[in-house]
Image (tube, grey):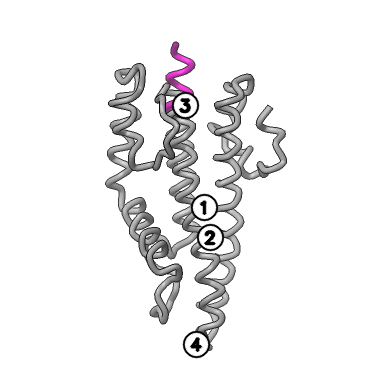
Amino acid sequence: MSTTDPRLTGKTLNLPTYRRACELWKENQTFSRALVFLGAKLADANHFCNRLARQTDEINSSNQPVGPGRWRTVSREADAFIFAVYGALDAYTQVAARVAGVATDREIKFPQLSRLLAEESRTPVRWAALREWMEGTYRARWFVALRRMRNEVNYRSVLPYPLKQPLRMRGPLDWPATYRNVIHCVETGLGYLVNVKQSL
């Protein structure tokens, strides 16, 4: 049963829709494994979010400039956080693809899911509401900002230095807001999967 996997944290298991999905598909090894991977990514994101929020608060409350060494540390953890939250969205994509019967062994990224549900699912009509919600999510400010930051980190390997104070600003540098947005996205997306499954 996936909810007993040691990689999952209490915070992740307390997400109501995630827990419902784990219970609903606990006998399906393929779905259950994909849910565990999703939960592990969410746990990683929470870990780095907490560390970054602490460090950002410390930097913002200090009158001292941020030196290159400290910034490299923050940058590495920001890199880990950004890839963990983006990885959680990709992990949700794997869950959704399996539940929707998308037959592919390719690595699937979150921005591809709407198209795959329309073109490669065995029952595309069933997922129309999920696709419509996803199209809106792709245009949401938080996702556009996260994707831009992910591409920047992927290209540069570090956040830009120096960065104007304060560090906490709109977009992905507001770590807790980004984490909450990703959690809400995953929970909502899982809700569509669970509701379709329970309506059959």
In the rendered structure, find residue 98 and report the number of the disc placed on it: 3
- Distance from Cα at disc 1 to Cα at disc 3: 21 Å
Q: Is residue 48 left or right of residue 145?
A: right
Q: Mark 4 = which residue?
A: 65
The residue at 59%/60% (across/down) is 50
Nearer the viewer's eye, disc 1 or disc 3? 3
Residues tagged 3 and 4 counted as in contact (Cβ below 8 A):
no
Q: Amino acid at mark 4?
A: Pro
Q: Mark 2 = which residue?
A: 80
- Where, quadrant-wise, is the C terminus in this rendering? top left
Q: Is residue 18 left or right of residue 109?
A: right
Nearer the viewer's eye, disc 3 or disc 4? 3
Residues tagged 2 and 1 counted as in contact (Cβ below 8 A):
yes
Residues drawn in magenta: 191-200
Q: Amino acid at mark 2?
A: Ala
Q: Residues within 10 Å of mark 2 (few under 14, many from 20)?
A: some
